[in-house]
């Protein structure tokens, strides 16, 4: 899991570059970048798990739907909440944080990164 955590740590480093004004990040470029890297950490955690389970690099998921299927097939058997958590993180970190740039409040962004870390640790 070291690679997934490395991505998360890189996301936190990127976030530190943004100034904070009125408990919000002043530069959405850094927030968007941090969320994008954190989301890649989530995908990396899933990939690493699947590789440990015997999948080849060519068999790794290539789309969000393929990641959902892989979670259902290989991980959700053990933890039914994991797929719902993945969907929430997809919407919050990837869509709202990275794609749309809607996250600016410090507590919300830090909460999203904390939830990302929690997910990565569950996938171990």
Image (cartoon, helix red, strand yellow):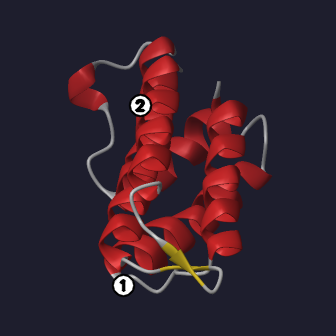
For image coordinates 65% across by 42% down, the residue present is 117
Query: 112 or 89: nearer the eye?
Result: 112
For image coordinates 69% across by 59% down, the residue present is 85
Please state if 69 lies on the left or on the right of 83 as rendered. left
Q: Position of residue 57 (x, y in %)?
A: 25, 22
The quadrant in which residue 61 appears is: top left
Please state if 58 lies on the left or on the right of 26 as rendered. left
Q: Is residue 2 above or below residue 75?
A: above
Under tag 2, what secondary structure? Answer: helix
Which image quadrant: the C terminus? Answer: top right
Residue 76 appears in the picture as rendered: no
For image coordinates 72% across by 43% down, the residue present is 118
Residue 11 appears in the picture as rendered: yes
Q: Which residue is mark 2?
A: 47
Query: 14 or 92: nearer the eye?
Result: 14
Mark 2 or 1, nearer chain start: 2
Q: Position of residue 49 (x, y in %)?
A: 52, 24
Q: Position of residue 52 (x, y in %)?
A: 49, 13
Query: 1 or 108: nearer the eye?
Result: 108
């Amino acid at each position: 899991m070291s690679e997934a955590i490395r991505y998360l740590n890189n996301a936190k480093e990127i976030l530190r570059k943004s100034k904070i004004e009125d408990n919000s990040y002043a530069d959405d470029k850094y927030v968007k970048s941090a969320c994008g890297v954190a989301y890649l950490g989530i995908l990396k955690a899933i990939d690493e798990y699947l590789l440990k389970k015997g999948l080849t690099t060519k068999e790794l998921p290539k789309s969000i739907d393929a990641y959902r299927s892989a979670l259902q097939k290989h991980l959700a058997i053990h933890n039914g909440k994991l797929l719902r958590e993945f969907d929430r993180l997809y919407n919050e970190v990837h869509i709202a944080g990275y794609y749309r740039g809607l996250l600016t409040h410090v507590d919300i962004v830090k909460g999203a990164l904390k939830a990302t870390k929690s997910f990565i640790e569950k996938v171990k």
